[in-house]
Image: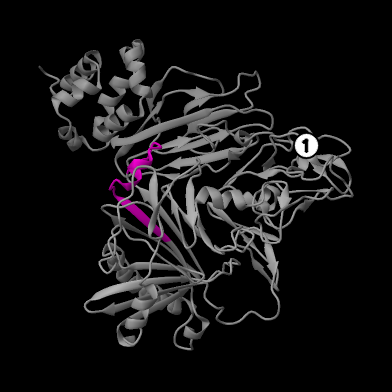
Amino acid sequence: DINECSINNGGCQQLCVNTLGDYECLCHSNYKLHWNKKDCVETKGPLPDNPSPKVLLHCIKSGGSDRCFLSCSSDVQIFSDASAIKISVTFKLNEGKCSLKKTEMFQEGLEQMIPERHNSVMESFQYVNLTCSSGKKIHGALSRLTATRAIFITADFELETSQKEVTDTCDVRCARKKTEKRFRKTIRTLRKTVSRDQFRVRVSGTDHEVARKALKLSEPQQSCGVGQMHMGNRCEELTGTSVCVSCTGYIVCMKFYMLLAFSSETLAPSSQVKRRAVALWGFRSYQCSPGEHSPDGFKPCLPCPLGTYQPEAGRVSCFPCGGGLTTRHSGASLFQDCETKVQCSPGHFYNTTTHRCIRCAVGTYQPEFGQNYCVSCPGNTTTDFDGSTNITQCKNRQCGGELGDYTGYIESPNYPGDYPANTECTWNINPPPKRRILIVVPEIFLPIEDECGDYLVMRKSSSSNSVTTYETCQTYERPIAFTSRSKKLWIQFKSNEGNSAKGFQVPYVTYDEDYQELIEDIVRDGRLYASENHQEILKDKKLIKALFDVLAHPQNYFKYTAQESREMFPRSFIRLLRSKVSRFLRPYK
């Protein structure tokens, strides 16, 4: 988890709350979250218990089949709420093209079927987003637009739980479940209608269909030539290089995705087309760019005034530099555009109150010049010192614990990254009865210094006078295996305030004490470490796991075939083990 709120308040205009793997912007009372999920919009008067729906999905059963109508209001001011239920549904059509086409039977069909209230399903939403994508790509040839291909329509709905459904016997969670259940039923009906070409879209009074075939009740249209397209009841030439060809009532998008943007007149310059479906790239181009703002986040936009900046698109305000600072020019998009009295280096942030550079506190870092914040370390990590400049300096300090059972490992905190300074870890290995401990140290990295400030020690107990099995304060890249000199092990790792290195990961296994003589014979044989092949075995986590698996549970030996063994281990290693096992099991032959 990264604390995004530590990075310029997450870009939130008011409040920022960090969550696991994400974050959320919130607003003070009398404000609601803007559609961009960052800005806060002042609410006029008390909020209604049930705000008027922005989107209405109406599905009607008639003559054994369903028809669905999606009506959208012209209001683009969309608010988010904690009670919102979000769902995404994708419908696949085996042939067709991504387009919206004006339909003449929308109203007629609606009027015919309205009386059948008992067969009607109606759901209202606060938000809907429709995208259309094709299974194949177009490479510019207009003639290919009419070719059949599989298309996918994805609908993202946002539905709010009605407060009226919350009662003494049904709390908010209960009401939410009821709403979700009803919602799933509506989606099943919608899925049927899309597959049967019975899905209609109304955008501010203009009716469209999202269908792959001509409607049966429609009169057949004349075929148009190459480079032409139906415009109402006639064919017209396609001119220019525009992506979308529009006319009164409908728009054909040659892009394979679209977003229904319920826009104001400023978004639709034509007086005849007040509302239109805008391709997703077009929708983004209507947003204010970084360094700009507007009352709704869309164009026309104003540059951020002097003394303010805005690093994100689609915002309704700009952030003040603070401390009476101004910017070099209007339309600033970064805090670095603010004319600070001194430029701060990485590991520092600019304090707009004192106008000084402050070192990033422990647990934070800043890799850039001239910033006004420090980034919090992710998760449970922290830094060794203040003034850190990189996320790699954030280290996990968790370590130590009680160990036992059959296999396991100990590792320095933050492994395989460098361990933190001034840390202390203690482990205890307590094997089951009549079992002993075998340890392999594949490699260990500790700073080389005379005073042994960082060290790893293994002994019988915490007493310095107890029997010691292993102790080191140096780096060793050659592996070593050994058995514990005591039935239990107390292990401690300690680093001083000034050192850091990669550290170690040390696996162990407990084995039946009846095999003590055999295990001792193997680990003390110099041939085990003589070749690089043998050393690599002791460094290979997969191979060590296989060896330890058999040592901990000898019956698991039969899981591995002779072929698998030969593929995993070199012949010299197998010969070494075979000779020792044979001598141990048949000492008199």
| Residue 546 located left or right of residue 289 | left
For the C terminus, give its image quadrant: top left
Q: Nearer the viewer, residue 319 or 14?
A: 319
Residue depicted at x 20% and y 24%: 565
| Residue 314 located left or right of residue 234 | right
Q: Position of residue 255 (x, y in %)?
A: 44, 47
Magenta-colored stretch includes residue 146: yes
Residue depicted at x 60% and y 22%: 447
Query: Does residue 465 sit above or below 579 in this rendering?
Result: below
| Residue 348 located left or right of residue 520 | right
| Residue 55 located left or right of residue 293 | left
Query: Does residue 503 sit above or below 297 in this rendering?
Result: above
Res 197 → quadrant: bottom left
Q: Which residues are magenta?
A: 136-155
Query: How is colour applied across the structure in the image?
Result: one colour
Helix, strand or loop at mark 1: loop
Residue depicted at x 43% and y 31%: 506
Q: Position of residue 158 (x, y in %)?
A: 48, 67
Q: Nearer the viewer, residue 105 or 358?
A: 105
Q: Position of residue 10 (x, y in %)?
A: 65, 52
Q: Is residue 81 visible?
A: yes
Query: Does residue 405 sit above or below 108 in this rendering?
Result: above
Magenta-colored stretch includes residue 193: no
Q: Is residue 3 visible?
A: no
- Per the image, the residue denoted by label 1 is 370
Q: What residue type is disc 1 on? A: Gly
Q: Position of residue 308 (x, y in %)?
A: 80, 49
- Taking the view exactly as shown, the residue that stands out farthest to the left is 589
